[in-house]
Amino acid sequence: RKEVEQDPGPFNVPEGATVAFNCTYSNSASQSFFWYRQDCRKEPKLLMSVYSSGNEDGRFTAQLNRASQYISLLIRDSKLSDSATYLCVVSVNYGGATNKLIFGTGTLLAVQP
Amino acid sequence: DAMVIQNPRYQVTQFGKPVTLSCSQTLNHNVMYWYQQKSSQAPKLLFHYYDKDFNNEADTPDNFQSRRPNTSFCFLDIRSPGLGDAAMYLCATSTRTGSSYNEQFFGPGTRLTVL
């Protein structure tokens, strides 16, 4: 089982739609959670961190459920410019001073005009 | 602007010919990472430096080496590139707070082609 699992998509949605991505992680010792965005042939860029209380940034809302080891990202009022791959990223402590990021394979979003 | 810079952006090499990829940062972050990303796959961590401490991932082939001569620069050396090493190589930086590695900032990547 992969440490971080995402539905690869693609999610094809019309402009203005609301779309939700889900992500599950297997390591209960995971400490920090992020959503990154990656455009085609570009580097990943941090979209937002994910907190237990949930957090919102404009049209984007992230939720974390530690009990279910589940993370979500909700995008409201989708724009063409939201088309990208969304990577779910989990920070895991493997003991001692080692703490590293584990990336999901990403969910591809295509917003249609 | 503070940033992570990678050179070159595109690198073509021949099978078995050593190649070095370069990363520099103006963020003054104490952690630097090298990732390999193949098409439609997640970035795969090869190794990272916390200051001068080198941390190799267990499944990183010996063919991949790294150097960090100072805080700002980090190099990825591929000693004998094979066709399977063709990929995007991403450099990233972060700070570290206690035992936690904070959000990572990525460079634009170097796309390596092996002929």
Image (spheres, rainbow, N blue to C red):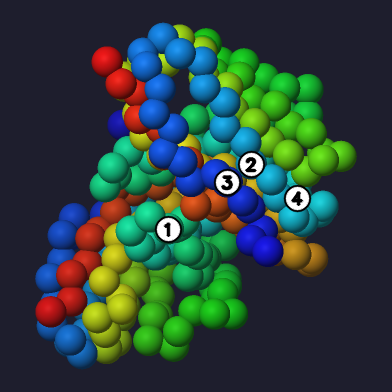
Quarter of the picture containing the C terminus of chain A is: top left
Label whose residue precedes the other's in the sequence (2 or 4): 2
Image disc number at residue A23 = 2
Q: Is mark 4 on a helix, strand or loop?
A: strand
B87 to B102, vertically: above or below: below
Q: Do the residues marked 3 and 4 share a common chain?
A: yes
Tell me how far mark 3 sits from mark 1, CA to CA: 12 Å
Q: Which amino acid does label 4 sit on?
A: Ser
Q: Which amino acid does label 3 sit on?
A: Gln
Q: What element carries label 2?
A: strand
- Of residue B114 and residue B73, the one placed in the foreground of this image is B114
- Report which residue position mark 3 lands on: A6
The answer to the question of whether label 3 and label 2 lie on touching residues, with beta carbons closer than 8 A, is yes
Image disc number at residue B41 = 1
Q: Which amino acid does label 2 sit on?
A: Cys
Tell me how far mark 1 sits from mark 4, CA to CA: 21 Å
